[in-house]
Image: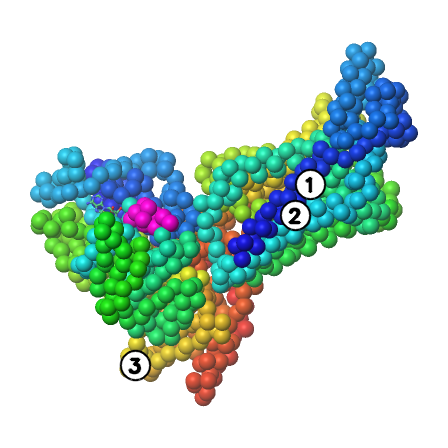
């Protein structure tokens, strides 16, 4: 069994290695035609000749030299234009994005012709390897129950060198994905046939990302199913969140595109879906007729009515750990890292400042967007709406939710984004804290202050602080993953939806009859 | 403002300190020779198994103590002069107090076995014990654990988690059957064995053999069998940690004797937690109870008394909980190992052998006396109330759903349990109320 696991690990590493190596491989011949077709009119006018001169009809064995040569030409042309103050000619895209189509179209090597073979060597090997690593646990872990053995003794889950290497890898991946997609050209080509089959469109970096996301979640969900097989709550929750990711976040939007309908993730909600009210989105939806209108109305109702109502009845867990894609990744890929979240009071303070600031920012940005939409003025209290949107998208949308939110899993725990950044979580958190039937009930005097609950709380809630005084846990950040209840060795914690009255509970107390246990 | 010294920074001493601070401005010094900060002894096993690190076992952050003006002093008290109100520390320091709380906890028992002080022979109580267990179990293959109690199983689980094989010697016919009824005890025997522990019932330790270098090589049982091992865990109970008080005028039996206000025979000296022995234990309670929550309650009670609100110790209805590998155990009220004349019972066991419920009630009145549950969580609040109000078994079964504390979507077994009752008492068969629980 152990041997199967180890071989699995090797196979996984091999698959990941080939996947990573793909950035440096391939065969690319940018012909003049391709250059002309891949560049926008403006770009071609500005730098077409130079690019043709530098790259035309040569063959490259990696996308990197193409993108760096291109960037040089692009930047110097831009600098010149700016110096001459020819603002209408300046190219505003980043060169890395501008070159992407060019590199993709000029690929001629194995990545163009043997996609399936390479798919098997990358995705195939990684999936096979991880399953070989995960499945033997059915037997190795013994009878169902909490198996957290060696978590703090293993380098991968205790910020050891494996943790740090994973951290660097993940962060680099996100930086490349957001800012240097051209470097992922080969990987994008690998999933091209799948994209063609689903949406009829060529794959983009976002299709690649969605596909990786679903794959990782599926594989790691298998791990969850084995690890928590004694808990129906965990099994159902994991199954549901996986379903919503694959069906709602991945397949349905792609299929919509096949029918020339606007891309829409029906379970995404403003303000997490921060560009929902952006002009291009509203106009795009309205332009698609009745179905687009329905999508728009659904988006508004979902965000402003369904979200608060469900949160009132079930707490924000119905979304954060049963539906949301970010939560889905955190609860599958991120589960091995949940114990790394900071439980200190200080971290709690930082959390409240940060997450509520993001919520305020999201509201201001949306306000500016709508103001611009209705008044037509491009400025909102003296600042360009476009700039606000752009900075939010960069800082919150890319850096915070992606690079920090997921990249930092192995260091800060698996809910960095959900805890410190997600404006939707902040919004639902306010409802959960002040008007909700949800709470975690504490079981009288049974707590032995062991600390398992706090340690395994991915949101960094010091659950024990409440449990040991016999008080219920009502915290805005709780995503209701239920793991505190699972890991508690004394059966102290239970997630419940009950009437609002007395939901905070009273601490256990002494009176004339001795210890009084009362939770209502 | 008085100076209150507390010897012991375990759950009882710390609870006393926190509660005195809540209602007074007294100067408080908490003394311990074990660790600088309060930690949860109950979680020691999880550190060894890698579920937690030591810092996770500290229920309060390190800045808590200063913020609450609770002075922490690390040091071993060697002697006390009760006439001068003075503590003498190892190393020569002294500390004067106005009032003293003794919360010194327990020490593991050793019964004078030959070889019991060899290297690699360990009790399991303190942080230092954990360090030694860690050091002596490095790269070993086999461990023998002596004693069939809660700590013995914990230690077995610890070693199994590190792939060290375990032989568990138990004096009784069945695991922990001085406390557990035979059905539960049998269920746990099976479960322990399913984790590949070599469980030896009715087997006692005779001696421990030296490997020639002062380290354990093997043990011999009373039946003469020799078992090779690199480690011996002694988990045959604990006794109050009071030997340093022997030559003082404080009255002691097994523990420090206290009255219902937790006062010792000396003025302004109190004893709480594991080290206290009640002269007149509350009804149905033992004179010495070495459990977490009673230490906590005693800490709360003594704080009241010290802050001029004289309060007696009334721990209420007995309850407790533990975990045997993957099976959680809870108990409320009294479930004795054997049935007396006037007790009746119903026992339900799930076919998987990982869950059971055992309810004891009065034969004549049908009022419930206690319940054991394994693999099913019950609501403390509800059973506390039902036991106080001496509800009947029929009432309890009808409303059993209300007492269930398992997480959502877990399989429920109330009907099966009721069926056991109905089979036993076909004349007054009952049906569960479908009352919605809120
Ligand atoms: C491994 C283990 C698991 C357990 N699990 C459970 C459980 O699940 N549930 C449960 O209810 N109970 C459990 N217990 C029992 C429970 O931990 C004890 O009942 C409880 O900790 C006793 O608390 P206390 O404050 O009385 O004493 P302690 O926690 O023992 O604290 C006493 C402190 O005083 C210090 N001290 C003593 N003498 C001196 C001196 N002369 N000078 C300076 N310092 C001194 C000691 O070093 C120690 O730090 C467990 C015990 C162990 C060992
Ligand atoms: S609630 Fe459970 S897990 Fe948390 S400290 Fe108490 S006993 Fe431990």
- Residue A505: x, y in percent? 45, 54
Structural crowding at the residue carrying mark 2, measured as other residues with C-alpha within 10 Å and reported as few (<14), some (14–19) or many (≥20): many
- Residue with the mark numbered 1: A19
> Circle 3 marks a residue in which chain?
B
Q: Which mark is residue B342?
A: 3
Q: Which mark is residue A126?
A: 2
Nearer-the-camera pick, B365 or B332:
B332
Q: Are marks 1 and 2 in contact (CB under 8 Å)?
A: yes
Gap between marks 3 and 1 measured at Cα: 73 Å
Gap between marks 1 and 2 measured at Cα: 9 Å
| Left or right, A345 with reference to A289 | left
| Left or right, B142 with reference to B277 | right
The N terminus of chain B sits in image quarter: top left
**Magenta highlight: main SS:** helix
> Circle 1 marks a residue in which chain?
A
Structural crowding at the residue carrying mark 1, measured as other residues with C-alpha within 10 Å and reported as few (<14), some (14–19) or many (≥20): many
Q: Who's the residue at 33% across and 34% down the image?
A: B66
- Residue A154: x, y in percent? 48, 45
Q: SS at mark 3?
A: loop
Q: Quadrant of residue A275?
A: top right
Q: Quadrant of residue A153?
A: top left
Q: Which residues are magenta?
A: B129-139
Say if the magenta span includes residue A83: no
Q: Are marks 3 and 1 on the same chain?
A: no
Q: Quadrant of residue B172?
A: bottom left
Q: Who's the residue at 88% across and 20% down the image?
A: A49
Nearer-the-camera pick, B284 or A240:
A240
Q: SS at mark 2?
A: helix
- Residue B223 in view of the camera: yes
């Amino acid at each position: 069994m152990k041997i199967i696991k180890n071989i699995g690990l090797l196979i996984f590493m091999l698959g990941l290695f080939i996947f990573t190596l793909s950035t440096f491989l391939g065969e690319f011949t940018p012909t003049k035609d391709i250059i002309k077709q891949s560049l926008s009119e403006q770009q071609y006018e500005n730098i077409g000749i130079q690019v043709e001169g530098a790259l035309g009809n040569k063959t490259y064995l990696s996308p990197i030299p193409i993108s760096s040569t291109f960037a040089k030409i692009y930047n110097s042309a831009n600098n010149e234009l700016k110096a001459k103050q020819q603002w209408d000619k300046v190219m505003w895209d980043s060169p890395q994005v501008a070159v992407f189509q060019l590199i993709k179209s000029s690929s001629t090597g194995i990545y163009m012709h043997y996609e399936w073979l390479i798919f098997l060597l990358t995705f195939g090997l990684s999936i096979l390897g991880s399953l070989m690593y995960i499945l033997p646990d059915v037997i190795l872990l013994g009878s169902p129950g909490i198996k957290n053995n060696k978590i703090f003794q293993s380098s991968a889950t205790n910020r050891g060198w494996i943790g740090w290497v994973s951290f660097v890898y993940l962060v680099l991946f996100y930086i490349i994905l957001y800012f240097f997609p051209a470097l992922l050209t080969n990987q994008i080509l690998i999933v091209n046939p799948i994209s063609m089959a689903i949406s009829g469109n060529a794959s983009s970096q976002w299709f690649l990302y969605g596909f990786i996301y679903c794959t990782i979640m599926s594989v790691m969900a298998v791990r969850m199913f084995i690890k928590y097989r004694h808990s129906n709550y965990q099994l159902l929750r994991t199954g549901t969140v996986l379903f919503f990711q694959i069906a709602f976040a991945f397949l349905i939007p792609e299929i919509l595109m096949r029918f020339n309908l606007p891309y829409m993730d029906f379970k995404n909600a403003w303000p997490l879906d921060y560009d929902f009210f952006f002009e291009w989105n509203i106009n795009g939806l309205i332009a698609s007729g009745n179905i687009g209108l329905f999508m728009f109305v659904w988006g508004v109702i979902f965000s402003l009515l369904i979200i608060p109502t469900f949160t009132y009845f079930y707490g924000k867990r119905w979304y954060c750990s049963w539906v949301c894609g970010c939560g889905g990744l955190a609860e599958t890929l991120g589960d091995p890292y949940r114990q790394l979240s900071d439980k200190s009071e200080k971290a709690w303070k930082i959390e409240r400042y940060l997450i509520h600031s993001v919520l305020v920012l999201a509201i201001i940005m949306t306000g500016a967007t709508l103001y611009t939409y209705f008044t037509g003025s491009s400025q909102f209290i003296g600042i360009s709406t476009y700039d606000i949107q752009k900075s939010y998208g960069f800082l919150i949308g890319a850096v915070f939710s992606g690079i920090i939110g997921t990249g930092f899993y192995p260091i800060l725990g698996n809910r960095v984004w959900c805890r410190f950044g997600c404006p939707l979580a902040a919004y639902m958190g306010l409802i959960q804290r002040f008007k909700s039937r949800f709470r975690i009930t504490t079981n009288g005097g049974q707590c032995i202050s062991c600390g398992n609950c706090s340690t395994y709380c991915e949101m960094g809630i010091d659950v024990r602080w409440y449990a040991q005084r016999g008080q219920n846990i009502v915290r805005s950040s709780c995503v209701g993953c239920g793991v505190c209840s699972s890991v508690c060795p004394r059966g102290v914690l239970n997630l419940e939806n009950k009437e609002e009255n007395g939901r905070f509970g009273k601490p256990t107390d002494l009176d004339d009859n001795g210890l009084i246990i009362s939770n209502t | 403002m008085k100076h209150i010294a507390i010897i012991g920074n375990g759950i009882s001493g710390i609870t006393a300190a926190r509660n005195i601070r809540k209602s007074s401005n007294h100067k408080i010094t908490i003394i311990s020779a074990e660790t600088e900060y309060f930690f949860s002894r109950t979680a020691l096993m999880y550190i060894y198994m890698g579920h937690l690190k030591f810092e996770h076992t500290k229920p309060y952050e390190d800045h808590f103590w200063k913020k609450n003006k609770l002075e922490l002093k690390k040091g071993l008290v060697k002697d006390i002069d009760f006439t001068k109100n003075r503590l003498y520390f190892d190393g020569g320091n002294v500390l004067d107090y106005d009032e003293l709380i003794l919360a010194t906890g327990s020490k593991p028992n050793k019964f004078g076995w030959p070889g019991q002080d060899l290297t690699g022979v360990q009790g399991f109580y303190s942080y230092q014990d954990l360090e030694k267990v860690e050091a002596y179990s490095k790269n070993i293959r086999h461990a023998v654990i002596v004693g069939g109690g809660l700590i013995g199983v914990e230690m077995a689980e610890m070693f199994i988690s590190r792939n060290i094989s375990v032989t568990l010697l138990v004096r009784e016919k069945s695991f922990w059957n001085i406390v557990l009824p035979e059905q539960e005890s049998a269920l746990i025997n099976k479960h322990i064995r399913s984790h590949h522990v070599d469980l030896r019932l009715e087997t006692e330790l005779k001696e421990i053999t030296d490997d020639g270098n002062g380290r354990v090589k093997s043990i011999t049982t009373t039946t003469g069998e020799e078992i090779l091992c690199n480690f011996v865990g002694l988990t045959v109970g604990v006794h109050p940690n009071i030997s340093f008080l022997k030559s003082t005028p404080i009255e002691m039996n097994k523990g420090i004797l206290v009255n219902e206000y937790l006062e010792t025979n000396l003025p302004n000296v109190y004893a709480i937690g594991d080290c206290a022995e009640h002269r007149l234990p509350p009804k149905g309670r033992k004179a010495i109870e070495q459990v977490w929550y009673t230490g906590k309650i005693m800490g709360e009670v003594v704080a009241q008394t010290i802050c001029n609100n004289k309060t007696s110790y009334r721990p209420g209805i007995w309850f407790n909980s533990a975990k045997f590998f993957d099976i959680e155990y809870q108990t409320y009220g009294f479930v004795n190992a054997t049935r007396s004349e006037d007790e009746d019972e119903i026992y339900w066991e799930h076919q998987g052998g990982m869950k059971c419920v055992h309810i004891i009630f009065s034969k004549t009145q049908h009022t419930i006396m206690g319940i054991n549950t394994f693999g099913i969580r019950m609501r403390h609040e509800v059973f506390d109330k039902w036991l106080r109000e001496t509800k009947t078994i029929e009432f309890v079964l009808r409303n059993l759903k209300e007492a269930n504390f398992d997480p959502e979507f877990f399989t429920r077994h109330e009907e099966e349990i009721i069926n056991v009752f109905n089979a036993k008492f076909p004349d007054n068969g009952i049906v569960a109320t479908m009352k919605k629980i809120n």
